Structure formats: structure tokens, C-alpha cells
Image: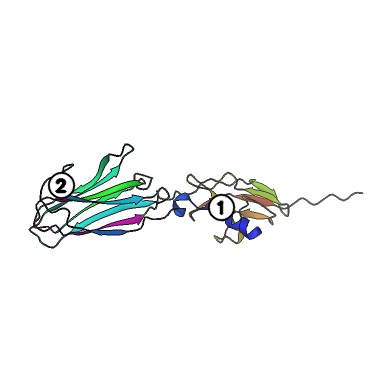
Amino acid sequence: MRALAVAVALLLLVPASALAKKTADLTFKSTGKAAAPGAAAEGAEGTYEDFPFKIAADDADGQVAVEVHWTNPADDFDLVVYKKNSTGGLDQVGSSGGAPPSTSESTTISQQGTDPVPPGDYVVRVNNYAATNPDFEGSVKFTEFTGPPNQRPVAKLKAPKKAKAGKAIKLDASGSSDPDGQVVSYAWDLDGDGTMETDGGSSPTLKHAFAAGVYHPSVRVTDDKGRRAYATRTIRVTKAKPKKKRR
């Protein structure tokens, strides 16, 4: 049970985009339906062929690349990609319509800012614009959505400016934050030599007693995507005054 609880806790720390899956690539080819050249108007038989595909709600794609190709450079096909809207109609989201002697057309649909390509039902339409041979082949390829770049966390460290030798003081990095996630671990350089020799785990505070001298302790904070930030303070540690003897 404990192992299961730990696994669930770790899963909750994973960004949602990392849990989503990329849509599987697919290929298609003509069946001879687009036999007659002409404009791809609704109801115009024999001029185009449609190939549907679906992006599931839990898919996360950064880009959709659609390509169609044929063998005769004198032939001319056009490519259009649609997304079905809420009323069942088709909204154009990509197109390519070159001219001979090209033997291919391609178009891409890219992620919307910080969001992946929208899920839904799509249609690839290949139009026989001026081809004597209706044969063609094509593909739809998906790239993984990576999301926006991970922002650096902000490290903050509170510590007293002065301390007495041998008396534990509190180093407090609880004010640290991460603008697009959370800080998950803290490490400490207590002697100022640049090496984080003390692993604080997930605790943002640490108590430590210094000998007399001047110290520059640092904290290194790490966010849930592995990016780091540092903060340093200076502490002057003086010798404790000897206790007066009673007479």
C-alpha cells in the first residue's frame, strides 16, 4: 500500500501534458473515387476523396503534418484539411494547392500557443484538380506536444546577518517559488565552497550551527521539471562570550 501511495504521489507531480499521448500516425491512398478533374465543390462527384482522422481528447500533439503525393508530374491534385465544427460543418484548417510539375502537396496544423492541436474529428480532402490518373498516396504524421518552455524557479533565502558560534540558526527558503510548477527539492552549500553538500530533500528550512567566521551559505532550489535557481546570504558568526564565574 505504501508503494502504491508513493507512485500516486509521484504521478500527481507530473505535468498533464507529459501524461497525454501523441496521436498515432496514419497513411491513406486513393480508391479511384476522384476520377474526374474539377473544383472540389460540395456534391461534385468524382473530383475529390475524403479521409477522416480523429485527435482524441487525451491526445497532445504539437503539430500535424499532412502530405499527399503522386507519380505523374503533369497531374495536379490539391490538398485541404478540415475540422468538423459543433454543427457538423467543416472548417478549413490547412491547405496546399500548387501547380505542375510538382508531384506532392503538404500542409501543417500547429499547436495553438501554449495548447496542443485541438482534439476533434478532421478530414483530409484530396481534390483531383487536373489529373488524368486518380491514384495518389498520403500520410498524416503527428509530433509530440512539448508545451511552453519551462520557466526558471525563483530562489529566496532568509537568514540572520549575525549569529553566535555553536548556536543553531534557521536558514529559510520557504519563500522560493516556481511560476509554472512547483519547487520539489532543496540543497544547501553551508561553507560557501560552491558544492551543495547537504541535501535538504523537500524541506525548505535547515538548522545549522557555525563556528566563528564569515559564511556565505547558499540554497539551490529545483522545480518539478528539473530547472534550478540559487540564493545566497552572508552571516557573520562571532565567538560566544564566556560565562562569568560566580564568586
The residue stretch that appears in magenta:
126-143
Does the rendering let one see residue 216? no
The image position of residue 92, as x and y in percent, is 24, 42
SS type, badge 1: strand
Does the rendering let one see residue 57? yes
Q: Amino acid at mark 1?
A: Val
- Determine which residue is flagged by label 1: 184
In the image: residue 149, left or right of residue 172: left
- Determine which residue is flagged by label 2: 45
Q: 89 or 218: which is nearer to us?
A: 89
Residue at 7 percent of width and 58 percent of height: 74
Q: Residue 104: within the magenta? A: no
Q: Residue 134: within the magenta? A: yes
The image position of residue 117, as x and y in percent, is 34, 47
In the image: residue 165, left or right of residue 113: right
Q: 176 or 162: which is nearer to us?
A: 176
In the image: residue 175, left or right of residue 225: right
Residue at 75 percent of width and 51 percent of height: 240
Residue at 36 percent of width and 52 percent of height: 61
The image position of residue 90, as x and y in percent, is 26, 41
Color style of the picture: rainbow
Q: Earlier in the sequence, mark 2 or mark 1?
A: 2
Q: Can you name the residue that lies furthest to the right here?
A: 247
In the image: residue 109, left or right of residue 32: right
Q: Can you name the residue that lies furthest to the top here?
A: 87
Q: Amino acid at mark 2?
A: Glu
The image position of residue 221, as x and y in percent, is 54, 52
Q: Residues within 10 Å of mark 1 (few under 14, many from 20)?
A: some
Instruction: Count the marks.
Output: 2
**Label 2 to label 1: alpha-carbon separation:** 60 Å
